[in-house]
Amino acid sequence: MLWKTLVLLLFYCSAYATVTHRWSRAVLFPASQRFKRSSAAFLNPVLQNSMEDVVLLYEFLLAELDIDKGQRISIKDEELSSLRKAAEFDTICNEIIPKSIPEIRRLSSRLSSYPRVLKKEDFERTVLTMVYTAYRAAQSQGHQKDTWAESFVNLYKALKNDLMLSYSKQPS
């Protein structure tokens, strides 16, 4: 009986470690694990691979975004929107980040209990979700405005916690 219990416990620990590692990204942004319709590749772009990419993302956000009635996000500046990185930005903003209050609350809840430092793509997507939430809070009124603002604050707290966690893990 003891051997069976020990083998079962060992199997459970092995399975838990494998599944947790393999699916950790899907926990925060499930849409990034879907297949792209036009190819067999996963829908998992990352915007920030260099400092130039960070500057370009900043330019995208400063160039003024357009959010239509269907909640599709696009860059108003035609020159910027024609860049290859703009297509990745479009995919992340329109296919991956959550856009409804329940989805954003789910993300905030998962972030608050996330046990380690976020991967750069998860951090980036959380920041873009925060930008979207701030926009929706600015465009809403009454109870809706309060709900969007609360979601923004929860995302802010989660990102602040992640930054503090990564800062505390750096060698002195």
Image: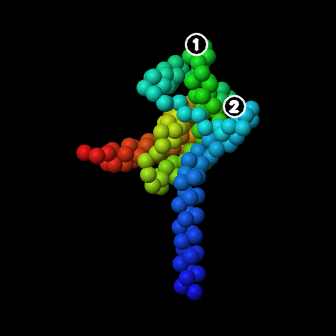
Does dot 1 land on a helix, a strand or a loop? Answer: helix
x and y percentages locating residue 21 in the rendered image = 54, 54
Q: Residues within 10 Å of mark 1 (few under 14, many from 20)?
A: few
Q: Residues within 10 Å of mark 2 (few under 14, many from 20)?
A: few
Does dot 2 land on a helix, a strand or a loop? Answer: loop
x and y percentages locating residue 163 in the rendered image = 38, 43
Q: Which mark is residue 114?
A: none
Q: Is residue 36 above or below residue 59?
A: below
Q: For the point 51% across and 41% down, which residue is it?
A: 122
Q: For the point 66% across and 39% down, which residue is it?
A: 42
x and y percentages locating residue 134 in the rendered image = 51, 34
- Residue farthest toward the left in the current orientation of the protein: 172
Where is the N terminus found, in terms of image quarters? bottom right
Q: Mark 2 sits on what residue?
A: 70
Color style of the picture: rainbow
Q: For the point 43% across and 43% down, which residue is it?
A: 159
Q: CA distance from mark 1 to mark 2?
A: 23 Å
Q: Mark 1 sits on what residue?
A: 79
- Residue farthest toward the right in the current orientation of the protein: 38
Q: Is residue 132 above or below residue 5?
A: above
Q: For the point 56% across and 16% down, which residue is it?
A: 80
Where is the C terminus found, in terms of image quarters? top left
Q: Is residue 170 above or below residue 13?
A: above
x and y percentages locating residue 67 in the rendered image = 62, 27
The residue type indicated by label 1 comes to Glu
The residue type indicated by label 2 comes to Gly
Residue 115 is at least partly visible in this image: yes
Q: Nearer the viewer, residue 60 or 135?
A: 60
